[in-house]
Amino acid sequence: MIPILYLSHCGSSIGGGERQLFYLVTHLNKNLYQPIVVCPDGGIFAEQLREANIPIAILNLPPWRKIVSRLTRHTAAAKLTDLAKEHNIQLMHTSDSWLNPYLLPVKNQLNVSVISHVRNLLTPAQVSKYAFDQMSHIITISKQSKAPLVQAGISSEKIDVILNCVDLSVFQPNPIVRDKNTDPFIVGIVGRIEPFKKQKTFVKIAHHVIQQCQNVRFYIIGAALDTPEHRTYDKEIHQLVSQYKLEEMIHFTGHRNDMPRVMQELDILVTLSAGSVIAEAMASGKPVIGTPIGSTSEMIVDSVTGWVIPLDSIEAISDKIVQLVKNPTHCVQMGAAARKHAEAVFSVEKHVQRIQDIYEKLIETNNENGV
């Protein structure tokens, strides 16, 4: 078996990137590959990996470019190199492109191929700062996230676009049975509470919808990290809910570990930041309303499985929600189309096979070069 070392952004919580990494390492061909995951800390994701019999190592990799990390990053990189040497690692794959600099010492000292997985929208300046030109290969989750890499001079042949995936056997249409005359219509947004996820915009959307439809409830699903920035943003969201007097209409669920159940509880998913939740909702037979960020436009079939609405068009998104609330049959039809599309495009097996194809080519090239 070929040992592959993966770098995870987090070990103490599970976001979209962690879910995608989990799908990958648990569905690899174990006759060919042996995954080992490096987590910066322990916690729920690290335990999930252990329970799936995926070997892990806890090694803090401080943000490479921050001034406070200058005294510790090289020590951390040396420990990572020693770990790779100990396990005879043949390939490294970071699930978070901000960890790219940690791949380079291993690549240079051990002559292994390195892959960066891009889950964020980059600027050309970031492409340069995070050494994408020195990666053996790059995987992006959308054509939109590939564009700045090409603009910065990275060869298109070095980049593969692979959409996020979902376990279709776990996320399935099984709607909660409600009394349409009394039970409210549920609209949700899923993700860590942070400015990038735009939960404040979601509250404004809820305010617009409630003015037209009273029998609707809005779920904010996720929790803030314990950092000053995230705590402040969380407080601002609650203040906005209070300002609009929506305390009875908007429910904060906190972090949920039962995402298949969460998706079944919803009637519509709204996403203002893209991510793997789109595939999860569609696999669960739910329409998705999103904005043209990241992979959203490539995952939602506009007007068929949901809608892609111009960014921050609060009234337009509100109008689509109202449209489905007033026509639940159309909502169900869009949900059925979403599931059908998910089956065709988002399967874990297809996703993992495409990545394994990349591994095979890189390893073959290394062997040809006598590495």
Image: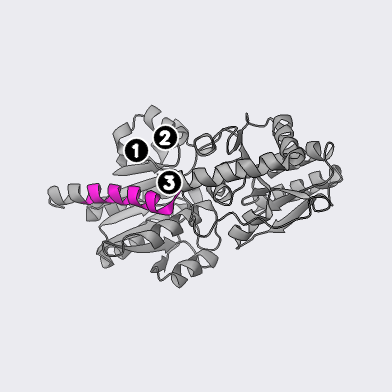
Q: Which residues are magenta?
A: 346-363
Packing grade of label 3 (10 A; few <14, some 14-19, many >=20) is: many
Q: Amino acid at mark 2?
A: Lys
Q: Is residue 351 magenta?
A: yes
Packing grade of label 1 (10 A; few <14, some 14-19, many >=20) is: some
The image quadrant that residue 143 belongs to is top left
Q: Amino acid at mark 3?
A: Ser
Q: Nearer the viewer, residue 129 or 294?
A: 294
Q: Residue at x 81, y 46 (%)?
A: 241
Labels 2 and 1 touching (C-beta < 8 A) = yes
The image quadrant that residue 71 belongs to is bottom left
Q: Residue under label 3, please give it.
A: 97
In the image, residue 48 sits, relative to residue 228, either above or below, namely below
Q: Residue under label 2, please give it.
A: 146
Q: Residue at x 68, y 30 (%)?
A: 313
Mark sitting on residue 159: 1
Position of residue 277 in the picture relative to residue 109 (left or right): right
Where is residue 66? Give x, y as percent: 49, 47
- Magenta stretch: helix, strand or loop mostly: helix
Q: Nearer the viewer, residue 33 or 76?
A: 33
